[in-house]
Image (cartoon, rainbow, N blue to C red):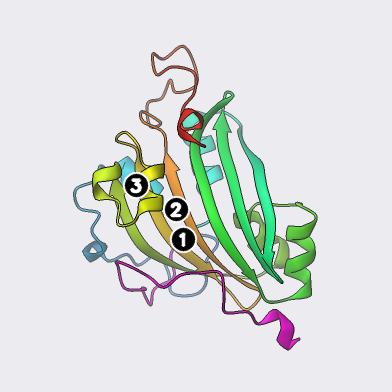
Amino acid sequence: AAAWRSSRGAPPARDLPPSSDHLGDVTGAGGLEFDVAVGLDHFTPLERLVLTANGNLQRIMSAFYNDRVTVDILQNDEILYGVYQRHVELKVRSRTFCVAHSVVSLRSRAAYDAVHRREVGIGQLFRHLGVMPSFDLLHVGRGAAEAEDAAAAAAAAGEGLFRVYDLSCPHLACRIQETFADGFLHDGFGEDDGFGEEGVEGREE
């Protein structure tokens, strides 16, 4: 069992201190407490809703768009034993509105099997395992000018939102960076909405 207790794969927090609270509907006991001191006061209410989603982003955005949101897994590579590097895209109406890069450190055989078979996304993985993760929002921003490192700057071309957060439980620990397409909170996103055809995809290498 000790082989699964890898502490590698998730770099240390750069910006906001981890919160002792657990947020939202996939996370553990502690209720829906949220401290505005994490630096969200200059975002709109809808942006704050997205930036504090904690494994339920797919459901929230499906409700917002009133349409099906799909998750395409583009990368799921084991870079160390029990440590995966993942790249997924969330789409609505064939448009990518969110690109997520993550490092997942697995701590149990059940978690390894689910990720290895590409059965579920990260948010669904916690429910699949029947566990309640903790959520720590580490960094949020808008556009490359607010990015704290080169990777975030490259992902945040334009004025799109981005965030970095951790989800963790005894089975696994995830460090996740998500970048959102410009105009993704427009209710016509993905239709003939004037935002073009590529969304975030056009900026991915």
- How far across and how far down the image is residue 129, in percent? 71, 67
Dominant SS of magenta comes to loop
2 sits to left or right of 92:
right
The x, y position of residue 51, in whole percent, is 37, 50
Distance, label 3 to label 1, CA atoms, is 28 Å
Residue ranking furthest to the bottom = 2
Q: Is residue 82 left or right of residue 143?
A: right
Residue 198 x %, y %: 49, 23
Front residue of 117/150: it is 150
The answer to if 190 sits in the magenta stretch is no
**Amino acid marked by disc 3:** Ala
Which amino acid does the dot numbered 2 rest on?
A: Ala
For the magenta stretch, what is the residue range?
Answer: 1-23
* Residue holding disc 3: 153
**In the image, what residue occupies the spot 49% across and 58% down?**
176
Q: Is residue 31 left or right of residue 130?
A: left
Q: Residue at x 72, y 61 (%)?
A: 128
Q: Are marks 1 and 2 in contact (CB under 8 Å)?
A: yes
Q: Nearer the viewer, residue 4 or 121?
A: 4
Residue picked out by circle 1 = 24
Residue behind mark 2? 53
Residue at the spot 36% in from the left edge and 31% down from the top edge:
182
- Element type where label 2 sits in the image: loop
- From the viewer's perspective, is the residue at label 1 or at label 2 nearer? 2
Quadrant in which the N terminus is drawn = bottom right
Distance CA(mark 2)–CA(mark 3): 22 Å
Q: CA distance from mark 1 to mark 2?
A: 7 Å
